[in-house]
Amino acid sequence: MRLGSFLFARITKDGSDSRFEDIRGSPPKFLVAFFAQATWVSACLLPVLALNSITPTLLASLPRFMATDFIGLSLFVGGFGFEIIADYQKNTWVQEKREKKHEEDFLTRGLWSKSRHPNYFGEATLWTGIATTAAGVLVSNVGQIGTGLIGSPLGRILALGIAGISPAFVLFLLLKVSGVPLSENKYDKKYGDRADYQKWKQNTPMFIPKF
């Protein structure tokens, strides 16, 4: 909801989404993008759908709070906050550029001085948090019984796979398909011959922040 409303507001203000300029005129390419996003949504939902398949009675027998709950919640809150701050900083920077308050061509301040894609890092981290919380339940005896995996020698491995497919798919798309590659190629074409841009790339990690 937060990301969707943010992107909707940005597209409404800009009039278009530059990420889709090359494909929106081609129905086959746009169809591929549509199904990729549909697959993304389905993969991200998988851990939650697996949890929802467990009856409330079984879930009630779990401890009130497990270690994976704490780890998962910490990752979710940290990633969510990281993404919000990164998006806010980028949006503020764009607005200031429109108002002629600076003449910078690319953002190198705030979280964008710690990672070239802090918003994507936050997105991946929050989904890892959800998967961690889900995994704690799914690998437990309650989770194994509730999902029908109890008794299978590979039950807990399958449970980890169900939980892990969400962040794994998010990372794959962000790092190999639609996120980082599109952004990096776009800026490389525009500013690749500039020394200040190359210095920022050399000193700033692509994904995992360096503090």
Image (tube, rainbow, N blue to C red):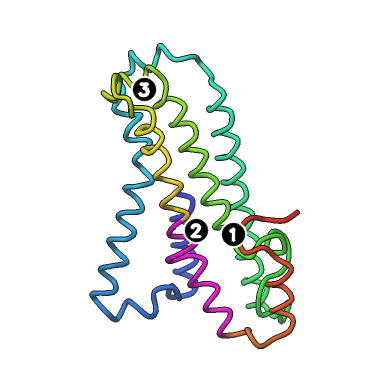
Question: Which mark's residue is nearer the viewer, 2 or 3?
Answer: 3
- Left or right: 58 as drawn, with respect to 199: left
- The amino acid pointed to by label 3 is Gly
- The amino acid pointed to by label 2 is Phe
Secondary structure beneath dot 3 equals helix
Q: Residue at x 57, y 57 (%)?
A: 119
Give x and y (percent) for residue 164. 43, 41
Q: Is residue 188 magenta?
A: yes
Residue under label 2, please give it: 6
Location of residue 32 with respect to 148 vertically, above or below? below
- Left or right: 49 as drawn, with respect to 91: left
Residue under label 1, please give it: 87
Magenta stretch, main secondary structure, is helix
The quadrant where residue 38 appears: bottom left
- Left or right: 188 as drawn, with respect to 211: left
Give x and y (percent) for residue 150. 30, 20
Please tell me which residue lies in front, 92 or 43.
43
Q: Return the mark for residue 209.
A: none
| Dot 1 or dot 3, earlier in sequence | 1
Residue under label 3, please give it: 143
Give x and y (percent) for residue 81. 61, 46
Give x and y (percent) for residue 130. 47, 38
